[in-house]
Image (cartoon, rainbow, N blue to C red):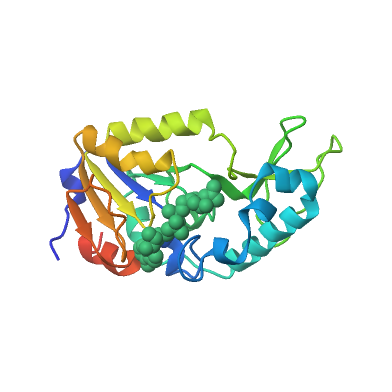
Amino acid sequence: MDTIDPSAYRHIVFFTGAGMSAESGVPTYRGKGGIWGSYSIGEYACQEAFDRNPEKVLGFHEKRRRSVLLCEPHEGHRVIAGMADAVVVTQNIDGMHQRAGSRNVIELHGSLWRLRCDACGFRKEDFGRAYETLRCGCGEWLRPDITWFGDMLDRNVMERAAEAIAGCELFVSIGTSGVVWPAAGFPALARESGAYCVEINPEPSGATSYDRVIEGAAGAVLPEMFGGC
Ligand code: OAD
């Protein structure tokens, strides 16, 4: 495989989706074994579901936390973390990049490890298997600080992501089906901004924005592509 020398690029963005964590054992959302094949979005991943039955939705997210805590970041996560100046723009909520040591991580869809109160604005990090508490001090339910279906993405987060992507010289998309907007528009933004665009995916998305498409798994391709960085 042709390797890439990261020192040849001043700004690098890794844009990741669920496939990035697949080899760690975290299920993807779509396709075989995907989360949305077993759990209905309308019952577990939207504000209406939470309003109807907060305990059920919180229970689902606690189950996800327990399963993610059994998984470890893989070599691909470590290769990315080794590039300390690179920015990671991720759709993932699992925190794997941070656990591998990445520091510049922009989480587009929030985090499994944060809760918020929409009544008073309180936010808290919470990293255990079970949530420390399900209720805010103000008495309302705390909800996972995650972008569910139908939610608006956080404007500041989107702006930071768009700025990093518009200013990058190398854009590497890994493990996303590219069907969920607005994140699905990022490869085109990188391309329009003049970045060299690479996709790594065993089943490439079919997007036309890429200069190079590598049909392969993140954990195998990344160490080879970046030659042991
Ligand atoms: P998807 O489940 O839609 O797509 C996962 C992608 O990863 C697919 O294209 C797979 O081919 C690819 N893949 C599988 N194994 C891989 C591996 N080992 N290495 C590289 N790629 C691999 O997940 P996302 O695109 O991340 O949002 O989904 C986007 C959003 O939809 C998620 O953030 C989530 C979901 O609903 C919310 O929950 C708001």
Q: Is residue 74 left or right of residue 65?
A: left
Callout count: 0
Query: From what the image shows, is residue 106 above or below residue 167?
Result: below
Locate residue 121: give its quadrant. top right
Q: Position of residue 19 (x, y in %)?
A: 41, 61
Q: Position of residue 129 (x, y in %)?
A: 69, 62
Q: Nearer the viewer, residue 101 or 116?
A: 116
User: Which quadrant is home to the N terminus?
Assistant: bottom left
Q: Is residue 31 left or right of residue 5?
A: right
Locate residue 152: give its quadrant. top right
Q: Is residue 66 left or right of residue 90?
A: right
Q: Position of residue 185 (x, y in %)?
A: 35, 39
Q: Nearer the viewer, residue 181 or 17?
A: 181
Residue at (63, 50) in percent of width and height: 45
Query: From what the image shows, is residue 78 above or below residue 93?
Result: below
Query: From what the image shows, is residue 13 above or below residue 101?
Result: above
Tell which quarter ligand 1 is in.
bottom left
Q: Residue furthest right?
A: 139
Q: Nearer the viewer, residue 84 or 106?
A: 106
Residue at (74, 59) in percent of width and height: 59
Q: Nearer the viewer, residue 22 or 181?
A: 181
Residue 229 visible in the shown view: yes
Query: From what the image shows, is residue 106 above or below residue 76?
Result: above
Residue 92 visible in the shown view: no
Q: Is residue 2 left or right of residue 97?
A: left
Q: Position of residue 151 (x, y in %)?
A: 59, 38
Residue at (87, 38) in percent of width and height: 139
Locate residue 39: give its quadrant. bottom right
